[in-house]
Image (cartoon, grey):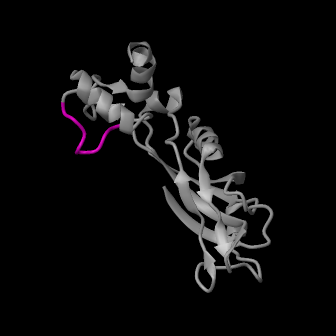
Amino acid sequence: MVLSVLVADGQSQPPDNADAAKTVPTGASRVGGGFSAPKEIHAPDPEYSDEARKAKLQGTCVLLVLIGRDGRPRGIKVQRTLGLGLDEKSIEAVKTWRFEPAMKDGKPVPALIRLEVHFHLYPDAHAPADPHAPEDVASYCTKHPTGFYGAPGTASGVSCSDWARKNQSKH
């Protein structure tokens, strides 16, 4: 997740479009000078949509999100779309995220942030090489519950969410 603070203190809604997000209202706080940005404390990975998985779509959805004084996301708007259901999956996931709120002079304040939600089908280079070794699949999928365990460009492999559903009764 990449987080950038756009505005805080006194804002009640994120801008309706990307152009509005580029302007910072007079009196809005910026990081520094007694103002600290919200910090992620709980951010589960989004799930893949079936359409995006079939199309092997990967990329980044950018959202504008107002983080309230209570650390809960509100007013989520898509700034850069991915399509094939991934925008909706981004919003669903971010609604469950929690933050330490932005602070100004030691008091929580609302903050408008830009979040990048990344979607990747394949594990990184440090993932186990053998998708048929149950311990390796379990270890990888525990860390990446919405990831894909297997080699890029091949038909073999398993989505971690599918693996978890199939193996839930075994644990």
Looking at the rendered image, the quarter that the C terminus falls into is top left
In magenta, the rendered stretch is 122-129
**Is residue 147 visible to the viewer in this orientation of the structure?**
yes
Q: Residue at x 73, y 78 (%)?
A: 28
Is residue 123 in the magenta section? yes
Q: Residue at x 69, y 79 (%)?
A: 29
**Is residue 80 visible to the viewer in this orientation of the structure?**
no
Looking at the image, how many numbered discs can be counted on the residues?
0
Question: Residue 153: x and y, percent?
Answer: 28, 32
Identify the image quadrant of residue 131.
Answer: top left
Question: Residue 99: x and y, percent?
Answer: 60, 57
Q: Is residue 105 above or below residue 54?
A: below
Give whichever of 1, 23 is nearer the camera: 1
Q: Residue at x 21, y 23 (%)?
A: 133
Q: Is residue 149 left or right of residue 133?
A: right
Q: Is residue 44 left or right of residue 148?
A: right
Q: Residue furthest left?
A: 129
Is residue 124 in the magenta section? yes
Q: Residue at x 25, y 22 (%)?
A: 134
Q: Is residue 46 above or below residue 13?
A: above
What secondary structure is the magenta-colored segment mainly? loop
Q: Is residue 76 left or right of residue 54?
A: right
